[in-house]
Image (cartoon, grey):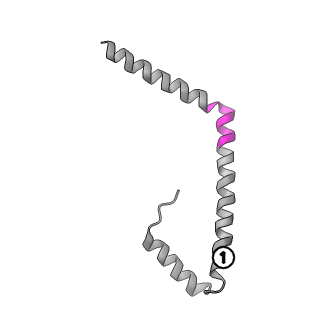
Amino acid sequence: MFQIGFLEILIIFILGIIIIGPKRLPELIKKILKTYKRVEAKLINFKKDIENDIGADEIKKDVFNEIKMEELEKNKK
């Protein structure tokens, strides 16, 4: 999802140690990760619900079939 490199993670970690302190930092990281996972799971479920409501699987199959038909028609010529 996010493209964070090693240097950015290192800077965030160092700032966390300085600002929050080494004793409370692991607890805060755990809370942040748990919250992130919950939000991510809810977004995935929301996306699946929307795809089911609009029939995304059928749309994908139709588009795939149309592309294959166009390729077959081009190969016949």
Does residue 31 appear left or right of residue 58 in this picture?
right
Does residue 50 appear left or right of residue 11 in this picture?
right
Task: Give the magenta-colored segment's residue range.
Answer: 48-56
Q: Is residue 36 magenta?
A: no
Q: Residue drawn 43% across and 18% down? A: 69
Residue 16 quadrant: bottom right
Which secondary structure is most common in the magenta stretch? helix
Residue 21 quadrant: bottom right
Q: Residue drawn 64% across and 62% down? A: 36
Q: Is residue 51 magenta?
A: yes
Answer few, some or many: residues within 10 Å of disc 1's Cα (few below 14, many 20 plus, some between 14 and 19). few
Q: Residue drawn 49% across and 26% down? A: 64
Q: Residue 63 location, x and y as percent? A: 50, 26
Q: Is residue 9 above or below residue 62?
A: below
Q: Residue 62 location, x and y as percent? A: 54, 24
Q: Is residue 44 above or below residue 27?
A: above
Q: What's the residue type where badge 1 is placed?
A: Leu
Helix, strand or loop at label 1? It is: helix
Q: Residue drawn 44% across and 67% down? A: 5
State which quarter of the image contains the C terminus: top left
Q: Is residue 20 above or below residue 65?
A: below
Q: Residue furthest top?
A: 77
Q: Residue under circle 1? A: 28
- Frontmost residue, 26 versus 19: 26
